[in-house]
Image (tube, rainbow, N blue to C red):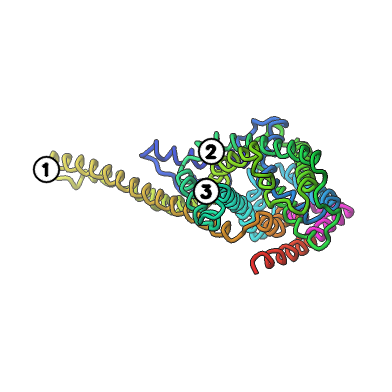
Amino acid sequence: MSQAKLIQYGDESSSQEENYQQNGDEVQTADEIDDGHGGAPANTASIFSASLNMFKSLVGIGILALPTAFSQSGYIAGVILLPICAAGMLYLSHELMNVALKKNTNAKNLVQFTKETCPNKIHSIMVNICLMIFQTGACISYVIFFITYIQKTMCNLNDGNFACSSKLVAVLISLSILVPVMMIQNMSKLKFGSMVGNIVVLISLTTVLIYCFIYLGQDGLGDIQPFNVSKMGGSIGVFIFSFEGVGVYFNVRNSMKQPTKFNSVLNYSISVAIALYILIGLMGYLTFGSGVNDIILFSFPDDNIPMQIVQFIYCISLILTYPVQIFPCVNVLEIKLRKKLYSKKSVKQIKQEGEENENVDLNQVNPDTSYNGMSSSNENDNQSLQEQDKTKTKLRRKYLIGSVLIRLSFITITYLVGILFDNISDFLSLTGDVCGIYLCYLIPAFIIYSQEKNYPLYKKIINLSIVIIAIGFGIYGLYCTGIKINEDFF
């Protein structure tokens, strides 16, 4: 629910649509349309504001599953594993930014920079896919939250009703609110909702910490263990997914007055994020022990009114944030649709329709019928303008229909997967073990290796060691998560 992501993708696409609507006599060509990964406004942000944007992009839905991750790893293992994952990522991120500094790149996002630095196109394709999976994965987590919250509320009202035992009612209620919000074409209209979402996250996490301290003082430690070897791998993917902000490095960097200071931004934002991650994960696990809910907000008793209020406003904020979160994925497909509809060939055809009757060969006009010819030419001009308006209206209608179908498709996908997974941590773990490993560790190492020709040997050894450990973590994490999912489903 990061404001940085809204800046990243929302403003540019919406401005393109507004430009088309306000200038009916001009249609964008394919070359004039951005690639769907626009950046934040360039050269405006200070180190502090950039650090704030980076921090907000790091603190997402994954933080609510960290107490469960700590229960899978054990409290000592969690305190060790989480910083290890962060340290490897931060080191490679610094090296990646050093490459960007040497190249003096103007890349607005990670996809653009990957295209510039990796000769093999497969890496830019993989980065694009992984970023889309990260965005979609967050939205799937939102869907799981919606369904869990509505079902829990229905059960509190009447434990034996149909809505308590079935997900259908929860799905229909959440869709009735979400679908209209998703149909908003101009994402900048949802800026307020995104800002409210950030405030709600801060309030929610603060409330969680306060009540964790209260319950620890009243009831003491829960059923905890320092190491949980049998389930430890399941926590790794969640830890790595928590660093989802890796995808907006270049967007935040491009927004800075001093892009050369971006490593400082990384140090500040990631250090604070790690401290918050450990605090939330550790306190949640120490308070509720092995019985901690997959979403920490649902671990508190039903008679805790403040936490009930937090759950409600958090659910509403996620509904408002869902379109912003999924918009990067939607935007990629909408821009492809726009390129197809507003291709150079189509634009040329539309513009030539108005020029054909202006290029009349006067030598072919009979002097005796010159007046009639002029009248006919004027009529043709009016007819041509009407045809242009009809063509542009038709293109606009086709685009809106395609846009609605794209958005409904993403809603359908996220809900189908969200219905299948009862636990957010399972899905986050899968995503982190695959796409998180690739984005945080593998692609930075590939870029560094391809660009640094005189790279010191000791740094090559460090990078290779991090990559090997990351791949090992990913394989072990997939194995443990696969076992857990198998137990949940079968």
Taking the image as shown, residue 411 lies to the left or right of residue 460, namely left
Dot 1 corresponds to which residue? 369
**In the image as oriented, which residue stretches furthest toward the left?**
368
Name the disc covering residue 331, or none. Answer: 3
Residue 446 in the magenta stretch? The answer is yes
Circle 3: residue type: Asn
How many numbered marks are there? Answer: 3
> How many C-alpha atoms fall within 10 Å of the one at disc 1: few (<14), some, or many (≥20)?
few
CB-based contact (under 8 Å), mark 2 and mark 1: no
Q: Quadrant of the N terminus?
A: top right
Circle 1: residue type: Thr
Residue 204 location, quadrant: top right
Cα separation between marks 2 and 3: 11 Å
Residue bounds of the magenta highlight: 443-470
Cα separation between marks 2 and 1: 55 Å
Question: For the residue labelled by badge 2, is the local secondary structure a helix, a strand or a loop?
Answer: helix
Going from N to C along the chain, the mark reached first, 2 or 1, is 2
Q: Quadrant of the C terminus?
A: bottom right
Taking the image as shown, residue 376 lies to the left or right of residue 443, namely left
Residue 81: give x, y in percent of width and height.
82, 52
Q: Is residue 92 visible?
A: no
Going from N to C along the chain, the mark reached first, 2 or 3, is 2
Question: For the residue labelled by badge 3, is the local secondary structure a helix, a strand or a loop?
Answer: helix
Question: For the residue labelled by badge 1, is the local secondary structure a helix, a strand or a loop?
Answer: helix
Q: Nearer the viewer, residue 209 or 33?
A: 209
Dot 2 corresponds to which residue? 11
